[in-house]
Image (cartoon, rainbow, N blue to C red):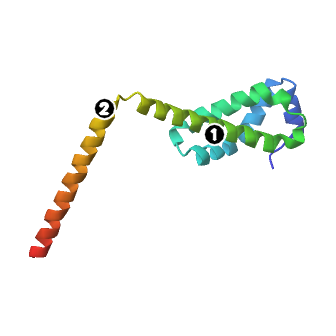
Amino acid sequence: MLVDFELIERARSGDSSAFNGVVSAYRKRIFGTIARLIGRPEDVEDVAQDVFLRLYYSLDQLRTPEVFEPWLYRLTVNAAYDYLRRQRRRHESRLSDLSEQQVMMADAAAGKEAAHEASHRRRVCEMVDDL
């Protein structure tokens, strides 16, 4: 348990060195939680930065320091889920940008490739049978 209630109280009242102390104390735990949730090591730091910003701007909303850890965990999880939602929307947006013709061409190419693989597999099986 990392909670230092006095440090959290000082951070809540605007003490920047206390806030830095809170960030330092929980940095590793926040990074670990984010890494497990988003599965993209290259984006963990960006999401963590979002968590620290959310923490900075909402720390004054924390009513009692005793619930700080679960509150911070929820803040971290929410930031990770927000990231995942943005990624999914970005991916869906890229797909929706494709014209119907492009989608049909991609489907046709995939069909040709599957047919080629099946033909190749048949030839390999025939060669094995001939042995």
| Amino acid at dot 2 | Gln
Q: Is residue 16 above or below residue 6?
A: above
Which residue: 87% across, 25% down? 13
Label number found at residue 98: none
Q: Residue 119, relative to residue 107: is it above or below?
A: below
- Residue matched to label 2: 102
Q: For label 2, count other residues whose C-alpha is less than 10 Å away and answer few (under 14), some (14-19) or many (20+).
A: few
Mark 1 lies on a secondary structure that is helix
Q: Quadrant of the C terminus?
A: bottom left
Mark 2 in CB contact with mark 1 (< 8 angstroms): no
Q: Which residue is mark 1?
A: 81
Q: Which is more toward the observer, 62 or 99?
A: 99
Give the residue displayed 57% in from the left and 38% down from the top.
84
- Residue type indicated by callout 1: Tyr
State the residue at coordinates (47%, 30%): 93
Splitting the image into 4 quarters, where does residue 22 fall?
A: top right
Tell me the crowding category of disc 1: few under 14, some 14 to 19, or many 20 or more residues within 10 angstroms, Cα based: some
Counting from the top left corner in percent of width and height, residue 90 is at 49, 31
Mark 2 lies on a secondary structure that is helix
Q: On the image, which quarter does residue 9 sit in? A: top right
Q: Which image quadrant is residue 97 in?
A: top left
Q: Position of residue 16 (x, y in %)?
A: 79, 24
Residue at position x 35%, y 28% from top?
99
Residue 75 in the image, given as x and y percentages of width and height: 73, 37
Nearer the N terminus, badge 2 or badge 1? 1
Task: Tell me how many marks there are.
Answer: 2
Rounded to the nearest angstrom, the CA distance separating label 2 from label 1 is 31 Å
- 67 vs 55, left or right, is right
The residue closer to the viewer here, 124 or 63, is 124
